[in-house]
Image (cartoon, helix red, strand yellow):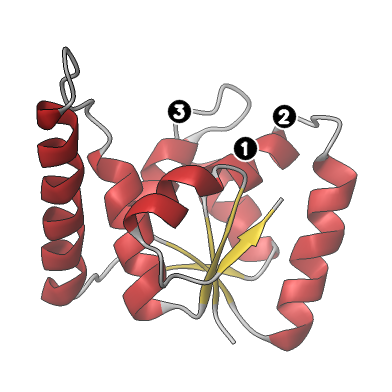
Amino acid sequence: MRTALDSNIVSSIWSEEESSVFLLQQIAEAQRIGALVLSPIAFCELLAHPRVSPASARSLLEKSNMQIDFMLSESVWMEAGIRYARYAERKRKAVGEFPKRLLPDFVVGAHALLQADRLMTMDGQRYRTYFPELVLYEM
């Protein structure tokens, strides 16, 4: 079983947030039953973490046996765009609301939907709304 990780999971651990011990336990459980993967978008978001450099980020992920799926298929990009378009249309129809620039979340969701078996995240609401068939492993 492939578990895709949202960047907020890894970032919380690297920031040593209160939830990090629990998150590490959940990651260990996910690793017992399969691979851990990150979309390239999630990896790029992690590069902004103040405690790591690009080289150390990659090293930490590799030591944790987390793979980065740098090569996303065309279907992932198309699915992300289609779901983002639905989101944008919904926001345009709402009075006074304009779509936010959240495309990275839609790429993460499409990657998890098409190239993993589930998504581990701390932000399940958007994924439940726009990827209802995606299996979420919520923290």
Q: Is residue 80 above or below residue 3?
A: above
Percent coordinates x, y for residue 95 in the rendering:
16, 17
Badge 1 vs badge 2, beta-carbon distance below 8 Å: yes
Badge number at residue 48: 3
Q: Quadrant of residue 3?
A: bottom right
Q: Position of residue 56 (x, y in %)?
A: 58, 43
Task: Name the residue at the top extreme.
Answer: 96
Residue beneath the point at 79% across and 29% down? 17
* Dot label at residue 11: 1
Number of residues whose C-alpha sits closer than 10 Å to that of mark 2, classed few (under 14), some (14–19) or many (20 or more): few
Q: Callout 1: helix, strand or loop?
A: helix
Pointer 2 or 3: first along the chain:
2
- Please name the amino acid that badge 1 sits on: Ser
Amino acid type, callout 3: Ala
- Disc 2 marks a residue whose amino acid type is Ser
Q: Secondary structure at mark 3?
A: loop
Q: Is residue 62 left or right of residue 96?
A: right
Count of number-bearing discs: 3
In the picture, measured across the screen, residue 88 lies left or right of residue 111, that is: left
Q: CA distance from mark 1 to mark 3?
A: 10 Å
Q: Residue at x 40, y 64 (%)?
A: 132
Task: Report the residue at 15% width, 63% height from top.
Answer: 77
Q: Is residue 69 left or right of residue 95?
A: right
- Could you say which quadrant of the image residue 63 lies in? bottom right
Label of residue 15 in the image: 2
Residue 40's place in the image compared with 44, above or below, is below
* Cα distance in 3D space between marks 1 and 2: 6 Å
Closer to us: 15 or 25: 25
Number of residues whose C-alpha sits closer than 10 Å to that of mark 3, classed few (under 14), some (14–19) or many (20 or more): few
